[in-house]
Amino acid sequence: MDEEQPETAPDETGRAEKRNPHSIRFHDPEWERIEAVAEKCGLTGPEFVRFAALAAVADGPPAGAAADRLAPLIELTFRATHILVSKLRTDMLDAGREAELDALIAGARGVQDDLIGGGLDGEDR
C-alpha cells in the first residue's frame, strides 16, 4: 500500500486522530480492479478500501445477503431434482414398478412430515 506514514484524520469529536498503517494482501488483478474503481471515485486504492471497509462495518451485512446468493442455487437444485425425479417416476411406471414407487413416495412423505413437524395432521395429500 502506498500509505507508509501514519496520517491524521478527525475523529467523531472533530479532533485529529492518528491512523496507523495495516497490511492487507490482494492478488494483483484484485488490486488493479480496486484501483480502477477508486480512481473513478476520485480516491486512491487505500482510501477506497478504507472507506468501503468502514461503510461495511457501519452498515453491517446487507439484509438477506446470504439468502440472495443462495436463492438461485436452491432454485437450480430444485429444478434439477424435479427433472430427475420426473424421469425416474416415468421409468418406474413404464417398467410396472408402481408398488415400489408408491412405497418410495410414502417414505418421502414420512421424512417430509418429520422435517416440518407433523405436516398436515394426517390428511391425505
Image (cartoon, rainbow, N blue to C red):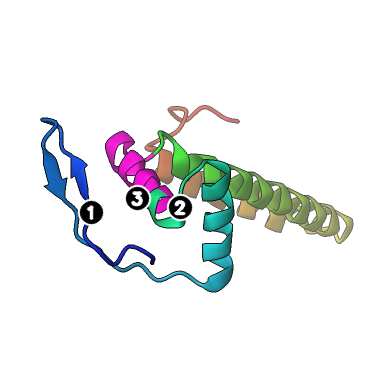
Q: Which residue is mark 3?
A: 50
Q: CA distance from mark 1 to mark 3?
A: 13 Å
Of 30 and 120, which appears nearest the observer?
Answer: 30
Q: Which residue does the image show at 35% across and 67% down from the upper left?
A: 24
Above or below for 114 versus 30: above
Q: Dot 2 surroundings within 10 Å: few (below 14), some, or many (20 or more)? A: some
Specify whether residue 92 is painted magenta: no
Q: Which residue does the image show at 68% across and 49% down from the upper left?
A: 76
Work out which quarter of the rendered image holds the C terminus and state it.
Answer: top right
Q: Which residue does the image show at 59% across and 54% down from the upper left?
A: 36
Q: CA distance from mark 3 to mark 2?
A: 10 Å
User: Residue 99: x, y in percent?
Assistant: 71, 54
Q: Is residue 10 left or right of residue 118?
A: left
Work out which quarter of the rendered image holds the N terminus and state it.
Answer: bottom left
Q: Which residue is mark 1?
A: 7
Q: Which residue is mark 2?
A: 44
Of 40 and 53, which appears nearest the observer?
Answer: 40
Q: Earlier in the sequence, mark 1 or mark 3?
A: 1
Q: Main secondary structure of the magenta part?
A: helix
Q: Identify the disc placed on residue 36.
A: none
Of 84 and 3, which appears nearest the observer?
Answer: 3
Above or below for 94 versus 67: below
User: Residue 110: x, y in percent?
Assistant: 49, 46
Q: Is residue 54 left or right of residue 73?
A: left
Q: Dot 3 surroundings within 10 Å: few (below 14), some, or many (20 or more)? A: few
Q: Which SS class for mark 3?
A: helix
The answer to whether residue 113 is seen in the rendering is no
Q: CA distance from mark 1 to mark 2?
A: 14 Å
Of 60 and 118, which appears nearest the observer?
Answer: 60
Residue 25 appears in which quarter of the rendering? bottom left
Give the amino acid at mark 3.
Arg
Give the amino acid at mark 2.
Thr
